[in-house]
Image (cartoon, rainbow, N blue to C red):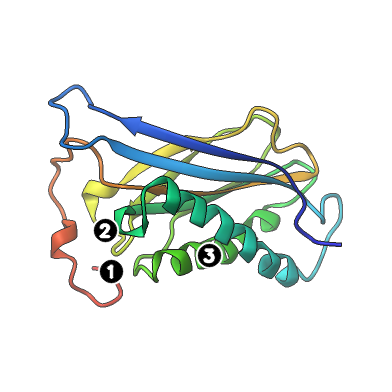
Amino acid sequence: MSLIQIRKRHLLIETTYHEGGPPPQKPLRLAAACAVIHNPFAGRYEPDLMPFMQALRSLGTELATELVDTLGGRQNVEVYSKAAIVGIDGEMEHGAVWHEAGGWAMRTVLGEPKAMVPAVKAVASAGYRVMVPVHYVHASYVRSHFNSIEIGIQDAPRPKEILFALVMGDGGRIHSRLGGLTKDKVSVHDGQR
């Protein structure tokens, strides 16, 4: 029996047309692809989570591919992140498996961008919402691209479930004007300052 049993999928697309100033040349789109799955370890301690983490790579690839398609191709993706909300019969480590599984999948689908993938995780009841931080895919310190998107699903995660999410977007904040490293000045090999 597969470790990955999906109850539902959810795709959120947030489009910002302006932030009170002049409209930008193109609206900013942030998208979150979510999957609610059964937690195979809810209610018990499992010492070896590595097979679960590896099995989740395929789910990560599906969600990452959906986001790339939603944003019109990987050349349009400028920000990314990942999130997990574990139902209350689980533990934080059940969400932490997404660091490698979701991050690996996103990097692979996007052609190996240089920056670390930010993340947020929580153990919570159904309907819980998290603010997911995003940043530039090739350098974590590009200030114009620090942003966030709220995710959550009204009936998830149930106590024995996990909500996994990947997030991508096609630009930095609208009207960003606070200085700092800009994406055209990134020069260090690993994308870090």
Residue pointed to by mark 2: 141
The kind of residue tagged 2 is Tyr
Q: Are circles 2 and 1 on residues that touch, CB within 8 Å?
A: yes
Residue lying at the far top in this picture: please name it.
20
Local crowd size for mark 2, using a 10 Å CA cut-off: few (<14), some (14–19), many (≥20): many
Residue pointed to by mark 3: 105
* Secondary structure at numbered mark 3: helix
**Disc 2 versus disc 3: nearer the observer:** 3
* Secondary structure at numbered mark 1: loop
The kind of residue tagged 1 is Gln
| Residue 3 in picture, x, y percent from top left | 79, 60
Residue pointed to by mark 1: 192
Q: Earlier in the sequence, mark 2 or mark 1?
A: 2
Q: Which mark is residue 86?
A: none
| Residue 10 in picture, x, y percent from top left | 59, 38
| Residue 19 in picture, x, y percent from top left | 23, 26
From mark 2 to mark 1, how far is it between C-alphas? 7 Å
Relative to residue 158, is residue 139 drawn left or right? left
Residue plotted at (34% across, 54% down): 77
The kind of residue tagged 3 is Ala
> Against 126, is 168 above or below?
below
Local crowd size for mark 1, using a 10 Å CA cut-off: few (<14), some (14–19), many (≥20): some
Residue plotted at (77% across, 52% down): 5
Q: Earlier in the sequence, mark 3 or mark 1?
A: 3
Residue plotted at (66% across, 62% down): 56
Q: Earlier in the sequence, mark 2 or mark 3?
A: 3
Quarter of the picture holding the C terminus: bottom left
From mark 2 to mark 3, how far is it between C-alphas? 22 Å
Relative to residue 13, is residue 94 drawn left or right? right
* Secondary structure at numbered mark 2: loop
> Against 17, is 43 above or below?
below
